[in-house]
Image (cartoon, coloured by chain):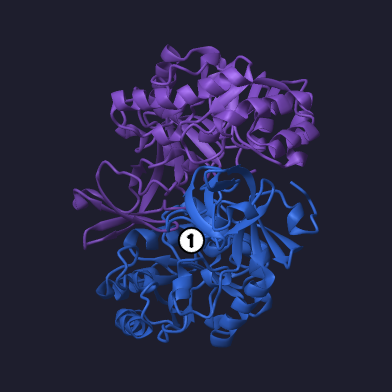
Chain colours: A blue, B purple
C-alpha cells in the first residue's frame, strides 16, 4: 500500500474514492434542511471516524450506530457527546464495555423487549429509547407495548429518552407525494407510542425520507454522505460521491475488458455496480467484466470508476476511503469502525 | 472480542463458524481424488494462513491466489514452495514486492497480454503461466495468441511453466454428463494452447469441476473446504462446513424473529443465506429477518446458524474463522489475507 500517494493514478487498485466536491455538496444539502442535532448521522453508512469528524465539525455531534464497535470508536475519537446504538443487543459484555465510557458521552441504547431492557440494565447502560415497529418487518415492539417497556426500563433505573422507529420500507418509494403520505401513516404510530413513553426524542427516518419525515425530532441518515445508484433513483438533493477505482487488467477482442475490482470490493445486495462508459457484464470475486461502448478506446492499464449499487456494505469491505479532487488525493480516511 | 472462548455460546455474534467434522470430510474427499500437488488450493476462498496450513500439512503445498496480498501472506507464513498468482496485474510495485521473496518460493504469475508480460518482467518475476480464455468472458488470451505470448515472456527472460484456463462458466452445470462434455470442449482449447506454449503445467478447474476436469495437470479449487448453498446444489462429495452464528435480538408476534447478522457478514451476490428452521425474509446491513416454522420455540437471546449462499465473499467480511465441534471452540483462525 502506497503510504502517501499524491494522485489517484498512484493509488493501488481497487481503491474506494470519495469525490470532495460531491461529498461537500451532499453535506451542505443536508445541513440546509437538518442542521446540528436535527440530524443524527448514522455511522453504519461510512464506518470512519475521519469522515465522522467532518460531520461533527459541521455541528452534527449526536450520532447513531448499528454496532457496539461503531459506538465505542466514535466515543474514543472524542467526536460525540450523545451516541445512540440504534439497534438491539443482548450482549451484556459488549454493552458493559460501552457503559464504561458513560462519563465521556451520553450513551443511549434501543430496546424493544424485556430481554433487551434487562441486558441494558445489567450492563450499566443509563439511557434507552423504546424502538417501535412502524411497518418494516424487523426490530421494534408493537405500539401498545411501548409504554409498558418504558415503565420496565425506568423501574430498572434507566432514563427513557423517548422512542425511535425506522420506516425503512418506505425509503425507496419513488413518488414524493406517496412517500410523504405513507411516512405520515408510519410516523402516526410512532407518535402514538411516544405519547405513552414520554421523553423528548422521536428518532427515525433515513436518507430516503430525510425531508419528508417531518414528524421526528431527529433524523437518522448516513448514506446521503456518499450515496449510491439505488438512492440516486429518488428525487434527493444528493449525488453519488463514492466510486471504486479499478485498473483494466485484460482486454478481449470479443468485446470486453476486465478490471481488478469485483464482488469483494462492492456491496452486491442491490445488484451490479454502474459504469458510465458502457455495460457491466458481471462481477466475480476480484474481477468485473465490462463491455465498453468504444472498445478501441480502452487498453490494459487504463483506469475505470464504478459506482456501487449499495454504499453501506461497499464501504465495509474497504480499509480506506480516499478523498480526491480532480485526480489529486487530498486525504486518507481509514474505515476504522468495521466488524463487530 | 472474547480472546479465548471455550464454547460457541460464549462467542460474540455474528461469528463465522467452521464445523470440524464437515471440514475434515471435505479435505479427505478432495485428497482421495487430487492428492498432493494434483490440487493447487485457491486461497481466495478462505484467505487464512491458519486454514491453509491444514492443507499444506496434507501435502498440498503448491497454492494459487487471486491477489498479491494472498501470495505474499502465504510465502511469509512459510506454507508454500510454489505459489501461483492466478490473476493478471500491471501493478509493478506489488509484483516487485512479491519478487523479493523469489528465494523462498517459486512465484508464478498469470499473463495474458503484452502489458502483463512486460509488468511481470519489469518487476523481476521469474516465472509465468499463459492464461487462456476457454469460454468464460473474463481474463485470458485467445488460443492463437498463447504461443506468441510465451515467446515474448521467454524473450523477456522469464520461465514459461505452461498454461492456465478457468472454465468458470461451467462450474454450476448441474447435469454431470453435460458438465463433463462441456469441460472437455473447453479444455480442448487449453490443450491446444499448451502445445503451442510448452512447459509442464496445465492449470484449471475449480470446486465444481474438480473430478470432471481430467485434462489439467492440477486443479485450482478452494471453496470445497467450506462450501456454500450454491455449490451444494451439485452432486459433489463436499458439504457446507461454514455457517454464520447469530443471536436473536428481536421477536414479533406477527411471525418473525430478527438476528444480528446481515449483509455485512454474508456474501449476497448469490442471494440470501439459508436457514434450516424456517424461511429467510430479507437481510439488512446488520439484521436478517427470519420466519421460523415454529415461532413459539424462539426467544430473544437464542442462537441461529445461517448457511451463506457464496462462501468466498462471506469469509472476506470476517476477521476470524472459528473452528468448532459440537458446541466447543477448537481453534481461532484469523482471516489474515484480506484486502489487496
Q: Identify whether B317 is placed above or below A162.
A: above
Position of residue A86 measured from the top left corner of the image (x, y, whole percent): 46, 66
In depth, the one of A42 and A322 nearer the eye is A322
Q: Quadrant of residue B159?
A: top right
Q: Identify whether B288 is placed above or below A87.
A: above
Please report the residue visible at 35 percent of the width from the left and 23 percent of the height from the top.
B180
Q: Quadrant of residue A164?
A: bottom left
Please report the residue visible at 60 percent of the width from the left and 70 percent of the height from the top.
A105
User: Is residue A100 visible in the rendered structure shown here?
Assistant: no
Please report the residue visible at 58 percent of the width from the left and 82 percent of the height from the top.
A29
Position of residue B280 measured from the top left corner of the image (x, y, whole percent): 29, 51
Q: Identify whether B101 is placed above or below A192.
A: above
Q: Is residue B201 left or right of residue A330?
A: left
Position of residue A134 measured from the top left corner of the image (x, y, whole percent): 31, 73
Q: Which residue is mark 1?
A: A310
Q: Identify whether A63 is placed above or below A178.
A: above
Q: Is residue B26 left or right of residue A137?
A: right
Amino acid at each position: 500500500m502506497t503510504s502517501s500517494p499524491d494522485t489517484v493514478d498512484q493509488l493501488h487498485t481497487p481503491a474506494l474514492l470519495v469525490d470532495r466536491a460531491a461529498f461537500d455538496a451532499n453535506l451542505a444539502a443536508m445541513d440546509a434542511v437538518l442542521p446540528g442535532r436535527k440530524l443524527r448521522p448514522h455511522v453504519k453508512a461510512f464506518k470512519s471516524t475521519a469522515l465522522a469528524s467532518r460531520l461533527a465539525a459541521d455541528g452534527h455531534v449526536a450520532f447513531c450506530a448499528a454496532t457496539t464497535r461503531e459506538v465505542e470508536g466514535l466515543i474514543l475519537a472524542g467526536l460525540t457527546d450523545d451516541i445512540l446504538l440504534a439497534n438491539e443487543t443482548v450482549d451484556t459484555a459488549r454493552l458493559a464495555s460501552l457503559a464504561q465510557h458513560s462519563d465521556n458521552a451520553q450513551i443511549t441504547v434501543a430496546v424493544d423487549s424485556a430481554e433487551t431492557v434487562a441486558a441494558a440494565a445489567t450492563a450499566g447502560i443509563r439511557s434507552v429509547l423504546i424502538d417501535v415497529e412502524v411497518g418494516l418487518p424487523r426490530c421494534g415492539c408493537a405500539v401498545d407495548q411501548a409504554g409498558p417497556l418504558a415503565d420496565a426500563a425506568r423501574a430498572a433505573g434507566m432514563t427513557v429518552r423517548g422512542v425511535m422507529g425506522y420506516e425503512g420500507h418506505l425509503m425507496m418509494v419513488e413518488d414524493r407525494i406517496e412517500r410523504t403520505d405513507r411516512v405520515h401513516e408510519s410516523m402516526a404510530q410512532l407518535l402514538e407510542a411516544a405519547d405513552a413513553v414520554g421523553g423528548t426524542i422521536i428518532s427515525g427516518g433515513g436518507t430516503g425520507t430525510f425531508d419528508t419525515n417531518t414528524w421526528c425530532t431527529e433524523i437518522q441518515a448516513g448514506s446521503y454522505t456518499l450515496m449510491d445508484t439505488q438512492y440516486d433513483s429518488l428525487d434527493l438533493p444528493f449525488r453519488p460521491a463514492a466510486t471504486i477505482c479499478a485498473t483494466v487488467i485484460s482486454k478481449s477482442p470479443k468485446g470486453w475488458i476486465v478490471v481488478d475490482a469485483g464482488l469483494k470490493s462492492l456491496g452486491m445486495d442491490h445488484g451490479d455496480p454502474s459504469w458510465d462508459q458502457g455495460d457491466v457484464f458481471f462481477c466475480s470475486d476480484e474481477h468485473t467484466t465490462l463491455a465498453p461502448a468504444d472498445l478501441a478506446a480502452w487498453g490494459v492499464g487504463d483506469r475505470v470508476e464504478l459506482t456501487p449499487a449499495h454504499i453501506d456494505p461497499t464501504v465495509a469491505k474497504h480499509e480506506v476511503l480516499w478523498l480526491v479532487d480532480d485526480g489529486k488525493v487530498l486525504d486518507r480516511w481509514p474505515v476504522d469502525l468495521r466488524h463487530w
